[in-house]
Amino acid sequence: MRDTFLNACKGIKTDYTPVWFMRQAGRYMPEYQKIRQKYDFLTMCKTPEIAAEVTLQPVKILGVDAAILFSDILIPLEGMGIKIEFTDDKGPQVYPTIKTSSHIKFLKEIELDLVYYVFQTIKILIKELEVPLIGFAASPFTLATYIIEGGSTKDFINTKRFMFSEPEGFHKLMKIFTDSTIKYLKEQIKAGVHVVQIFDTWAGILSPFDYEIFVKPYVKKIIDSINKVPVIYFCSNTSGLANNLKDLNANVLSIDWKIDMKDATDLFKYHALQGNLDPLTLLGTEDELFKRVKKILIHGRLAKAHIFNLGHGVNINTSVDILKKVVDFVHEFKTMEV
Ligand code: CP3
């Protein structure tokens, strides 16, 4: 197996910078669309042969250094008594919603049998892959925003109302998600994933003070309970939360583009870093794009170890050719003059 990515996760400096992209499997890719025309997204996630095939697409087409399990952060809710649906217009829909403490009874700790297809997909993949496989889960807070709001939101009013009016109930919710996430990730590791990533897409909507109270203890518990494989923690608003993230025991911090890579290497000396290209630079000219890619790579050399990635997922309008050019550029950069 190509182990450059795994070494970087362990904080070992590598002879070239490994690269993969968050949301590297998806609708921007014609090969994905071809399968997606026949099946809805949930069916794809729940059919191990299809999920495995789609996981492999970016590895074969782009030549990235890691595969990420094709699934979704909301899938574990299916094992917790909650129904999920993905609609083309409104995105994910979750029900019943949990808007107050009195609704917590709708949620039960995860039953792994109900999401067996996730572990089956992993078992198929580890036989076929030549690069490491990343498993994943959302952080309890990010998952909670979906179950409280009932889907995606821009203002998080229900989440914050719950949090600030019934903090004890909110902590109870976090605890259920934390225990279930640990079980869920450990089963992915048992099935064979080489690394896990925790997605904290929405933690950045909180003040550092509230991050400490409502997010960090639970993320910390998850990270500290995973000791067989490296852990990547992805959190939005890295710059605003920098002081809060410093002492997390994750092997890798995945950072967004709102912090300069050089500043990040000063702040996070003991973590390997993953990131941090603005995904929308991929929609501009190659000249503008590669100026930024190069800058990130140069500064990434100052990190304990660096994995090139975006600061968030690939946008649907991205060209496959451009992404492939970025992969080749990152791989060849080691020999370039700086
Ligand atoms: O390639 C990969 O990265 C692996 C698969 C993956 C998906 N979602 C597939 C997906 C991963 C790791 C995720 C994580 C995820 N899902 C996050 C965290 C990362 C992030 O992007 O912030 C979040 C917030 C979700 C929730 C979610 N899933 C939303 C809001 C949506 C709808 C909007 C959108 O981007 O399409 C999804 C759907 C989804 N998840 C798709 C894919 C490929 C599109 C499904 C389709 O084909 O219609």
Image: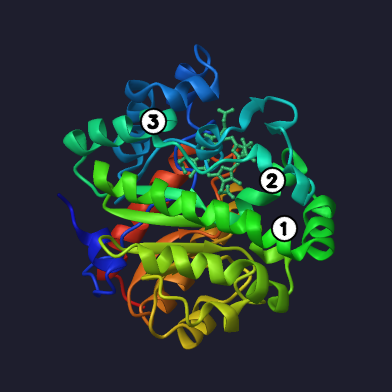
Q: In this view, does 281 lie above or below 80?
A: below
Q: Which residue is drawn at 40% across and 49% down?
A: 183
Image x and y of residue 123, in percent: 24, 34
The answer to which of marks 1 and 3 sits earlier in the sequence is: 3
Considering every residue shown, the one lying at the far left of the view is 1
Q: Which amino acid, by three-letter code, is at mark 1? A: Gly
Q: Residue at x 57, y 58 (%)?
A: 175
Give left or right: position of 107 versus 120.
Answer: right
Give left or right: position of 39 versus 105.
Answer: left
Give the quarter of the image for residue 218.
Answer: bottom right
- Residue 201 seen in the current view: no
Give the quarter of the image for residue 244.
Answer: bottom right
CA gap, disc 1 and disc 3: 27 Å
Q: Which amino acid, by three-letter code, is at mark 3? A: Asp
Q: Which of the two residues, 175 or 85, is positioned nearer the viewer here?
A: 175
Q: Residues within 10 Å of mark 2 (few under 14, many from 20)?
A: some
Q: Name the residue under label 1.
A: 169
For mark 1, give the secondary structure: helix
Quadrant of the image containing the C terminus = bottom left
Q: Which amino acid, by three-letter code, is at mark 2? A: Ile
Q: Name the residue under label 3.
A: 113
Find ligand 1 in the image and state its quadrant.
top right
Image x and y of residue 178, in percent: 51, 56
For mark 2, give the secondary structure: helix
Q: Name the residue under label 2.
A: 104
